[in-house]
Amino acid sequence: MARLTMKFGGTSVGSPEAIAQVVEIVKDHLAQDNELAVVLSAMSGVTDMLLESAAAAAGGERERYLAINAAIGAKHEAVIDELIAARSTRAAIRASLGALLGQHRELCEAVSILGEATPRISDALVSFGERLSSRVVTAVMADRGLPVQQFDSNRFIVTDNMFQNADPLWEETESRIVDGLLPVLGAGIAPIITGFIGATPDGTLTTLGRGGSDFSAAIFAACLACDELIIWTDVDGVMTTDPRLDQRARVLPYVSYQEIGELAFYGAKVLHPKTVQPIISRDIPLRVRNTFNPAHNGTLIGSRALASETVIKAVTGIKDVSMLTVSGPGMLGVPGIAGRTFLATANAGASILMISQASSEQSFCFTVVDPLAQHVKRAVEQELRREILHKDIDSVDVMSDIVIITVVGSGMRGTPGVAGRVFSLLGDHKVNVLAIAQGSSECSISFIVAEDDLERAVGELHNLALETVENDRVNGWASAP
Ligand code: ASP
Ligand code: MG
């Protein structure tokens, strides 16, 4: 017997067929006498539809938000039609979904009167996705005789008031989860919980950011002291690279917590970057598995860093970024220019993906997402206007047709020559590197190349990751520690 938290993503609950699959998986795990907490995403597409309804309401487009409301209703209705047999269950779940959809419409009306959807109201609006999906899935499971009970996570996850990207207040959250859910598990009932949603201490709804259900699940797994967290998604696991960049991509059997952190931050879409944060200190293993291919073992993520000879595990590429370069002769030895630049960037609402400075101190560069690049350039020029006027700084330049490539592997730490190997490989294949940064965790190296070089660079570096997977297999590490 084990205690598990399982999370099913949007595609896993995205259609009646997918939900039928989820029911089988949950049933199997309950049959093995496990204690099980289940965290669900909204049905795929619904969060986007809800955000669209917020925009439509703010713009006073009544027909559009009503149409979205109806489409969301129909998506859930199809699940009831196909998967729920008992009449009384059908009637009860229809009534509860109808009430929620009614609240969504009312909120849209309110937004359209105000003419604005603030982050706070937007969170209330998107919360309907998980609230609907968790109810409908619970009803299906109950109809099949599984011992389940639905819960809204705003009862448990207490957060700060950073709407649309809230962070949990740990102590309060932990005590509420322990008090509220341990007795449920103890009674042999599987709680079916909304992902994504929290609430401030005074009860106002918040969300944990796009893709945040993974993070929710990790919070529950940590607070319930689970033996394992399983994230069920629509791919077999974490891959050596994006198969759209190189079709030889393979599933990695084992990845360390640190590696997955870097991978998620640098573009591997499989997990929300904050997912490992709650489980690292408790050393709870995390497994990424495919709802549509449950026979596959997936990827195990844990605390041990396996040192393979080749060290590099995975390669990611991030497109749609721009590089800003601040340069000029007057920067040498002048403290504060970088600090002011980054503060101006943050105040402009952009987060920085990568920073690099040459030791000559004549210039430094950093990257932001494309849509914000010109805005950030203006903000930085405004901040540095005196230095520009005095010609201490020449310019703030934007380069847009670039990509960030990151190679990841914990074995890099203390293994000399990895960077050398990476860059000589790129040199051999005539890829020009525009800027380089190595994280202090020494678990990744990121660099910038022209967008035209993306596939060639990833392809070459990916060879190193494929070698690692092969070595791990030969060394018997394929199924991990
Ligand atoms: N439904 C939310 C989103 O699409 C949260 C999640 O699925 O993780 O961002
Ligand atoms: Mg996701």
Image (tube, rainbow, N blue to C red):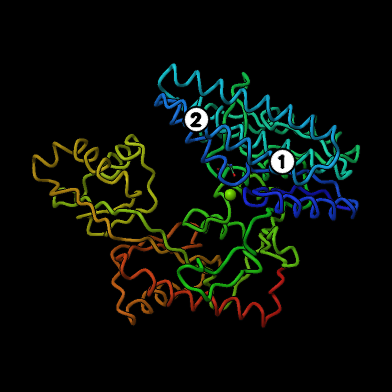
Other-residue count near label 1 (Cα within 10 Å), few / some / many at <14 / 14–19 / ≥20: many
Q: Which residue is mark 2?
A: 65
Position in image of residue 242 (x %, y %): 50, 66
Judged from the image, the secondary structure of the residue bearing numbered disc 1 is: helix
Other-residue count near label 2 (Cα within 10 Å), few / some / many at <14 / 14–19 / ≥20: many
Left or right: residue 398 versus residue 311 is left
Position in image of residue 360 (x %, y %): 22, 59
Residue shown at the point (52%, 72%) measured from the top left: 312
- Give the vertical position of 13 relative to 163 (above or below): below
Position in image of residue 40 (x %, y %): 68, 43
Q: Amino acid at mark 1?
A: Phe
Residue shown at the point (51%, 72%) measured from the top left: 415
Q: Quadrant of residue 128?
A: top right
Left or right: residue 462 versus residue 295 is left
Left or right: residue 233 versus residue 3 is left
Position in image of residue 453 (x %, y %): 33, 71
Whether disc 2's CB lies below 8 Å from ligand 1 is answered no
Residue shown at the point (50%, 20%) measured from the top left: 109
User: What quarter of the picture does the C terminus occupy?
Assistant: bottom right
- Give the vertical position of 334 relative to 441 (above or below): above
Q: Which residue is mark 1?
A: 220
Residue shown at the point (77%, 41%) measured from the top left: 224
| Residue 89 numbered tag | none
Mark found first going from the N terminus, 1 or 2: 2
